[in-house]
Image (spheres, rainbow, N blue to C red):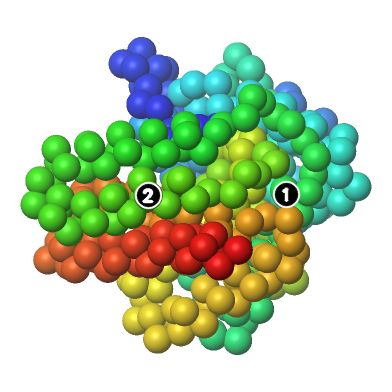
């Protein structure tokens, strides 16, 4: 399980820049597509748009106009490392195992020499951008069910990532936070202490396929269905990790959007209750643990923001994390 993207070396970054420069040429992008997607004509007209750019990957949208006015759009996703191959192998396993994978945006081809995935382009609105309360709440319930469906796939994509490994990565990130932002230690340390204590109360779990980075921005509303995007961080671990990760990302979203902030705990409860109903074997206490752990991990992300709100957000995330750890402890004591 990839708990964070690895920084590429100088040669990998250079190769990635060269690929981006080459594929931004519509003729080159079209040639790549027509060579690996049989239904695409080499005579189609094409345009390319850069959609996202990171040190270790980028995504290009390619719009094609073929004969008789047929329009098609694809995404070219190129990586500095071998993440694309792993996602391709997973997608093949999902297609072979799941009778209906229409809610997952899966690649249709992989070009090993280019470390390039070809995916269908899905038009829609990210769940993180929807502000109408009733629609948002209903889609949160859909997201909870889709997350549980991933866990039920039965696919074993790799060796298990244990809770101890996840804890160690989180503690290492917290140490980096203290070096980057020493002033945060006083605010964060009580929640870090609660994290270490709560770890001893985790329930035993059966590992499952997890998305690994499940969050509102990785669900796309097409107007008729919700589609899951970006399984780059997939893994094999306690499925409660996904449930808790989503709750933490939802809470972060509510902190930054005033239109959602007053509904924050209602929205959290809506996702959580639906998820627990769809995945009754997943420990509710473990979901709370990973909720808190993810909130602590995200304080490191907040530390990069040079804004006046940074201390307030870090303080709130720390308080919410401590409350989540206390939930696990109280559930364990009650049982």
Question: Where residue 159 sits: x, y (%)?
Answer: 64, 25
Describe residue 174's horizontal placement relative to residue 84 as left or right: left
Above or below for 224 versus 21: below
Give the camera-side residue of 268 and 5. 268
Describe residue 265's horizontal placement relative to residue 84 as left or right: left
Q: Residues within 10 Å of mark 2 (few under 14, many from 20)?
A: some
Q: Dot 2 lies on which element?
A: helix
Q: Which residue is mark 2?
A: 197
Cα gap from disc 2 to disc 1, whole angstroms: 30 Å
Question: Where residue 38 sits: x, y (%)?
Answer: 82, 31
Q: Residue at x 79, y 31 (%)?
A: 92
Question: Where residue 299 sits: x, y (%)?
Answer: 28, 53
Give the camera-side residue of 228 and 69. 228
Q: Dot 1 lies on which element?
A: helix
Mark on residue 254?
A: none
Q: Which residue is mark 1?
A: 150
Above or below for 54 versus 334: above
Question: Where residue 216 sits: x, y (%)?
Answer: 53, 62
Residue 139 visible in the picture: no
């Amino acid at each position: 399980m990839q708990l964070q993207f690895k920084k590429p070396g100088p040669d990998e970054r250079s190769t990635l820049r060269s690929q981006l420069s080459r594929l931004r040429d519509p003729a080159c992008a079209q040639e790549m597509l027509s060579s690996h997607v049989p239904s695409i004509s080499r005579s189609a007209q094409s345009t390319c748009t850069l959609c996202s750019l990171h040190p270790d990957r980028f995504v290009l949208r390619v719009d094609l106009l073929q004969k008789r006015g047929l329009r098609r759009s694809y995404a070219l996703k190129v990586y500095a490392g071998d993440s694309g191959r792993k996602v391709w192998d997973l997608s093949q396993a999902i297609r072979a195992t799941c009778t209906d994978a229409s809610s997952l945006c899966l690649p249709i081809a992989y070009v090993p020499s280019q470390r390039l995935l070809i995916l269908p382009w899905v038009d829609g609105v990210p769940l993180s951008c929807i502000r109408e309360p009733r629609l948002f709440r209903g889609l949160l319930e859909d997201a909870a069910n889709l997350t549980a469906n991933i866990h039920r796939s039965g696919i074993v994509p790799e060796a298990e990532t244990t809770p101890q490994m996840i804890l160690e990565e989180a503690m290492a990130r917290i140490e980096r936070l203290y070096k980057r932002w020493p002033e945060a230690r006083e605010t964060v340390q009580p929640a870090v202490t609660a994290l270490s204590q709560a770890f001893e109360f985790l329930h035993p779990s059966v590992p499952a396929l997890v998305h690994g980075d499940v969050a509102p921005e990785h669900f796309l509303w097409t107007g008729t269905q919700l589609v899951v995007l970006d399984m780059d961080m997939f893994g094999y671990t306690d499925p409660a990790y996904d449930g808790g990760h989503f709750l933490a990302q939802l809470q972060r979203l509510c902190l930054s959007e005033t239109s959602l902030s007053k509904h924050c705990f209602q929205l959290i409860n809506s996702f959580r209750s639906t998820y627990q109903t769809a995945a009754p074997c997943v420990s509710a206490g473990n979901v709370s643990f990973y909720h808190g752990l993810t909130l602590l991990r995200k304080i490191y992300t907040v530390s990069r923001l040079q804004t006046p709100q940074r201390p307030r957000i870090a303080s709130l995330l720390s308080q919410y994390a401590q409350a989540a750890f206390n939930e696990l402890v109280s559930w364990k004591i009650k049982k």
